[in-house]
Image: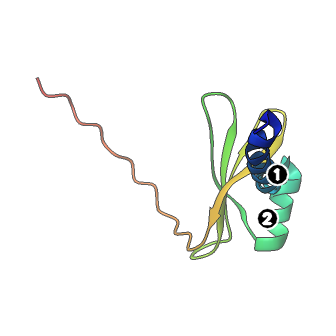
Amino acid sequence: MTTLRKATPILAAAAGAALFAAPAAAAAAEQCSEHGKVLGQFAKTYKEAPVAAGLTRDGRLLQVLSSGDDGTWTIVLSKPDGVTCVIMAGEAWRPKKFEPVEAEEPKA
């Protein structure tokens, strides 16, 4: 058997995998855009607004968007250059009142 014939099944499998991977990569790329556009789209489509935010150690902005009690929610992460990506989304958002936790003294 020639080398080309031996390689044909491997090449076919690789080509098939590439065909399936391309749409997934494209879909992931479509989930990032300019910060204002992302927030505007979620406000328009899902009536979501930021309800919590924080900065990561590397300077990115993490935001939780929600449409209110028992509504939809989305977590987005923004880089300092303004590119914002959807991390995850879901339903049944339940806000919780902040209750500080008191630190315990270490026992000697």
Name the residue that disc number 2 marks: 42
The front one of 107 and 20 is 20
Percent position (x, y) of residue 18?
A: 79, 49
Q: Which residue lies furthest to the left in this view?
A: 108
The kind of secondary structure element at disc 2 is helix
Q: How crowded is mark 2: few (under 14 residues within 10 Å), some or many (20 or more)?
A: some
Left or right relative to 16: residue 96:
left
Amino acid type of the residue tagged 2 in the rendering: Phe
Q: Residue at x 84, y 54 (%)?
A: 30
Foreground of the two, 39 or 4: 4
Of all residues, the one furthest to the front in this rendering is 1
Can you give x and y, in whole percent of width and height, for residue 25 in the image? Answer: 79, 49
Q: Position of residue 33 (x, y in %)?
A: 86, 49
Q: Residue at x 30, y 42 (%)?
A: 102
Q: Is residue 67 left or right of residue 19?
A: left
Where is the C terminus found, in terms of image quarters? top left
* Disc 1 target residue: 22
Which percent across, then down, holds residue 38? 83, 55
Query: Which of the 4 quarters of the picture holds residue 42?
Result: bottom right
The mark lying in front, picked from 1 and 2, is: 1
Real-space Cα distance between discs 1 and 2?
Answer: 26 Å
77 is higher (above) or lower (below) than 46: above
5, above or below 88, in the image = above
- Whichever of labels 1 and 2 marks the residue nearer the N terminus, that label is 1
Query: How many numbered discs sit on the rendered protein?
Result: 2
Name which residue lies at 73% across and 44% down: 10
The crowding category of the residue bearing disc 1, from other C-alpha atoms within 10 Å (few below 14, some 14 to 19, many at least 20), is few
Residue lying at 84% horizontally and 52% vertically, measured from the top left: 26
